[in-house]
Image (cartoon, rainbow, N blue to C red):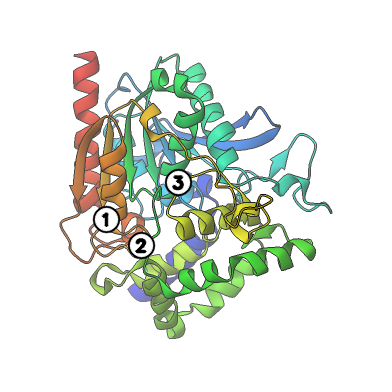
């Protein structure tokens, strides 16, 4: 009987939207729509605390600074809530009295809107962006909205994977935002990725140019959307009888750590992932993996069309300037992360001008997906991260 109840709960969590998940667990949820300078409309979700009807003890009053959470590639703000209360970072922050805000980058399940362009319209004008534009436009717009609503001068920033690199894009091009951010908590920062180990991702990187050209010619500008067709297929492919196959795929991409994998939570995760991305986003990722350079998007430089007359070497796109990120940066990494190798994370740590801390996850088998799905993520990652945020609040306001 208990197994049937758990199965039904898992299936329910996989089909609920992110706001429905938050409400289901007894927390308040606010939905804000944020317009970027280039016309995209982004969903920004706020957890101001528990609902009175939840029956749980009331939280402490808001601290003096809100927290903005930014998700990874092909994901959404569901990254921060899927593990549920007592484990997921968003709920732990809310329980500690923080004002929690979760952003959704353009092109994801919750941010498929634009003032002029429709994501399904021929020509693909909606999809003409990489993660460069997410850092240049989306993150600043989200920060400005949070500060405008809360009346606070600065906020904490927490990013996972792509959520870290877009932060450094913003700081490179808009260093004035240093004045609006207290600290940057960089979880598995995907700034450098050229040491990644996953065979599936490596195969994509090797064939990225012809694959992107073919998809672009076919008018396919969106990659792996979260829609009514794909989500049920992923659930069917990863039914309990087939969950081993899904685990093996994730192990190849993210790293292998079986003791941390909860099969029920994995199936819930696959109801929310993938959440969509642009073709250019993935192509830009392939660029920094192949070149080892954290640089702007340049498809011409990737496939050789950028050659100058009389030269054999294509011109290289400009690097992002990490030295312009002046806020304290805390880096969290795992030794068995197949996406962001620990040496890549430490390279970033060496290059930021204000490194405030480096945390190696205690579990030596900790992988990329473990940061948001591991059974012990609350203890191994979220507990020290909360301590870091507490420290900055005390320094600033007491």
Classify mark 1: helix, strand or loop: helix
Q: Quarter of the image holding residue 175?
A: top left
Estimate the spatial distance between the alpha carbons at disc 1 and disc 2, rounded to whole Å. 8 Å
Closest to the observer: 175 or 305?
Answer: 305
Q: Which residue is mark 3?
A: 294
Mark 3 Cα shell of 10 Å, populated few (<14), some (14-19), many (≥20): many
> At 46% across and 70% down in the image, what residue appears?
202
Residue at far right of view: 122
User: Which residue in the structure is indicated by mark 1?
Assistant: 343
User: In the rendered image, which residue does mark 2 sit on?
Assistant: 195
**In the image, is 148 to the left or to the right of 256?**
right
Q: Are marks 1 and 3 in contact (CB under 8 Å)?
A: no
Q: Residue at x 61, y 51 (%)?
A: 109
* 10 Å crowding of disc 1: few (<14), some (14-19), many (20+): some
Q: Residue at x 65, y 45 (%)?
A: 129
Q: Secondary structure at mark 3?
A: loop
* Marks 1 and 2 in Cβ contact (< 8 Å): yes
Query: Percent x, y for residue 310?
Result: 66, 52
């Amino acid at each position: 009987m208990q197994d049937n109840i758990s199965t039904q709960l898992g299936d329910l969590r996989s089909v609920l939207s992110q706001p429905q998940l938050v409400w289901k667990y007894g927390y308040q949820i606010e939905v804000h729509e944020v317009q970027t300078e280039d016309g995209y409309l982004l969903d920004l979700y706020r957890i101001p605390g528990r609902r009175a009807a939840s029956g749980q003890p009331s939280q402490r009053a808001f601290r003096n600074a809100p927290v903005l959470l930014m998700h990874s590639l092909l994901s959404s703000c569901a990254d921060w809530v899927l593990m549920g209360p007592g484990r997921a970072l968003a709920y732990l922050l809310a329980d500690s009295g923080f004002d929690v805000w979760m952003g959704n980058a353009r092109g994801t399940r919750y941010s498929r809107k634009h003032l002029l362009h429709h994501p399904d319209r021929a020509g693909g004008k909606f999809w003409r962006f990489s993660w460069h534009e997410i850092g240049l436009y989306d993150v600043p717009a989200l920060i400005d909205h949070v500060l405008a609503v809360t009346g606070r001068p600065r906020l904490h920033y927490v990013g996972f994977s792509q959520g870290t690199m877009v932060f450094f894009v913003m700081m490179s091009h808009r260093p004035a935002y240093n004045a609006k951010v207290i600290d940057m908590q960089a979880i598995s920062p995907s700034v450098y990725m050229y040491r990644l180990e996953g065979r599936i991702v490596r195969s994509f990187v090797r064939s990225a140019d012809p694959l992107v050209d073919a998809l672009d010619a076919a008018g396919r500008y969106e990659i792996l959307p979260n829609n009514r067709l794909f989500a049920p297929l992923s659930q069917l492919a990863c039914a309990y009888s087939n969950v081993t196959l899904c685990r093996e795929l994730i192990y190849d991409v993210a790293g292998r750590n079986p003791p941390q994998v909860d099969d029920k939570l994995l199936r819930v995760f696959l109801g929310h992932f993938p959440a969509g991305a642009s073709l250019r986003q993935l192509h830009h990722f392939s660029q920094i993996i192949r070149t080892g350079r954290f640089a702007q998007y340049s498809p011409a430089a990737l496939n050789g069309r950028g050659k100058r007359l009389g030269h054999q070497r294509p011109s290289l796109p400009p690097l992002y300037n990490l030295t312009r990120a002046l806020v304290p940066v805390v880096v969290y990494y795992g030794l068995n992360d197949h996406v962001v190798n620990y040496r890549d994370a430490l390279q970033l740590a060496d290059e930021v001008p204000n490194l405030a801390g480096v945390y190696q996850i205690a579990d030596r088998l900790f992988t990329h997906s473990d940061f948001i799905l591991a059974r012990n993520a609350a203890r191994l990652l979220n507990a020290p991260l909360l301590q870091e945020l507490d420290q900055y609040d005390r320094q600033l306001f007491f």
